[in-house]
Image (cartoon, rainbow, N blue to C red):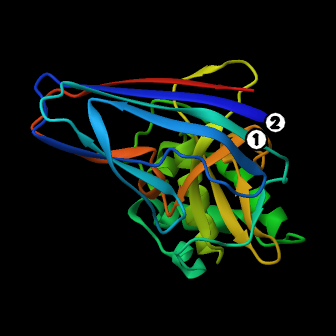
């Protein structure tokens, strides 16, 4: 499948920031089942300071906000060819060693609720993938998809307490539980072609676990599937913070507002 993406983010300030840097992790990965046909990033109100590859093989663009700019517009767009790998990414790569993905983070710390979830899952499974698919299904049954109950600061434990959440929450719960069961696990940010719309409010997120004999395998808890050709992988990390599409710091700007426009289509 050839997927076309256009992702525009506009920042507006009542007063110009005195200094600002933004990290962009918005260039899709060249990986199993995914080939980049074309991709470009355009910036108004800022400039690309440097581009580098981080420990997860994410392509990171560092942007500096122009002095005196009251608005910054970032437009990323291109086309990606995808193929069906039944969710299997395969062999581990990148600078971070495999054991790194068993580290906990504040978002993925396994507290009492995650531990109870793993106990409820049980151990009677034919293989690792069956166990992880059952974990995905149990998370969705325990935390149905719903907007408004969580935000970017919500941890896996708090999402379980709320009893509802979005794709970010599902990924964090899956990662916390998978690591508790001994699997290296990581967060994935990217895009999903939806059958009923082109315009979307935000990108998508899911999780990957490392399974012996298969390598990295993807699990989209929110949709109850492993990623197929509708999915475009962009960035990976221990949690949302390491795979966020845009993150950074701004000094001196007041009353920041943001407008996001995203189109994803075949």
Residue at (52%, 47%) from the top-left corner? Answer: 169
Of residues 77 and 180, the one nearer the viewer is: 77
Q: Residues within 10 Å of mark 2 (few under 14, many from 20)?
A: some
In the rendered image, which residue does mark 1 sit on?
A: 81
Residue at (9%, 39%) from the top-left corner? Answer: 18
| Residue 124 drawn above or below residue 145 | below
Query: Gap in Å between the C-alphas at discs 2 and 1?
Result: 6 Å
Tell me if residue 155 can be seen.
no
Q: Where residue 77 sits: x, y (%)?
A: 55, 32
| Residue 11 drawn above or below residue 177 | above
Of residues 161 and 226, the one nearer the viewer is: 226
Horizontally, residue 260 falls left or right of residue 3, namely left
Horizontally, residue 181 falls left or right of residue 125, namely left
Local SS, label 2: loop
- Which of the image's four quarters has the C terminus? top right
Of residues 208 and 30, the one nearer the viewer is: 30
- Which of the image's four quarters has the N terminus? top right
Local SS, label 1: strand
In the picture, the disc for residue 132 is none
Q: How many marks?
A: 2
Q: Where residue 124 sits: x, y (%)?
A: 84, 71
Q: Where residue 103 sits: x, y (%)?
A: 49, 75
Q: Where residue 179 sits: x, y (%)?
A: 59, 71
Of residues 217 and 128, the one nearer the viewer is: 217
Circles 2 and 1 in contact, beta carbons < 8 Å: yes
| Residue 41 drawn above or below residue 185 | above
Tell me if residue 197 can be seen.
yes
In the picture, the disc for residue 1 is 2
Horizontally, residue 247 falls left or right of residue 26, namely left
Q: Residues within 10 Å of mark 1 (few under 14, many from 20)?
A: some
User: Along the polypeptide, which appears first: circle 2 or circle 1?
Assistant: 2
Residue at (77%, 50%) from the top-left corner? Answer: 226
């Amino acid at each position: 499948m050839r997927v076309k993406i256009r992702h525009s983010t506009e920042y507006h300030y009542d007063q110009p920031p005195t200094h600002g840097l933004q990290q962009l992790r918005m260039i899709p990965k060249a990986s199993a089942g995914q080939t980049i046909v074309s991709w470009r990033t355009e910036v108004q109100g800022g400039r690309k300071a440097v581009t580098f590859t981080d420990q997860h093989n994410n392509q990171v663009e560092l942007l500096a906000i122009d002095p005196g700019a009251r608005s910054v517009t970032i437009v990323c767009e291109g086309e990606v060819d995808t193929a069906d790998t039944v969710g299997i990414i395969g062999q581990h790569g990148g600078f971070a060693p495999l054991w790194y993905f068993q580290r906990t983070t504040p978002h993925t710390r396994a507290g009492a609720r995650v531990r109870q979830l793993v106990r409820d899952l049980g151990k009677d499974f034919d293989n690792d993938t069956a166990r992880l698919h059952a974990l995905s299904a149990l998370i969705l049954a325990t935390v149905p998809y719903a907007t408004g109950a969580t935000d970017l600061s919500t941890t896996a434990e708090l999402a379980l307490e709320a009893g509802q959440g979005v794709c970010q929450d599902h990924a964090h719960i899956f990662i916390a539980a998978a690591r508790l069961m001994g699997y290296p696990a990581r967060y994935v940010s990217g895009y999903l072609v939806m059958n009923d719309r082109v315009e979307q409010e935000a990108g998508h997120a899911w999780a990957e676990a490392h399974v012996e004999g298969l390598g990295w395998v993807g699990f989209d808890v929110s949709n109850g599937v492993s990623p197929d050709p509708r999915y475009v992988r962009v960035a990976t990390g221990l949690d949302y913070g390491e795979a966020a599409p845009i993150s950074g710091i701004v000094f001196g700007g007041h009353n920041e507002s943001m407008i996001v426009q995203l189109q994803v289509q075949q």
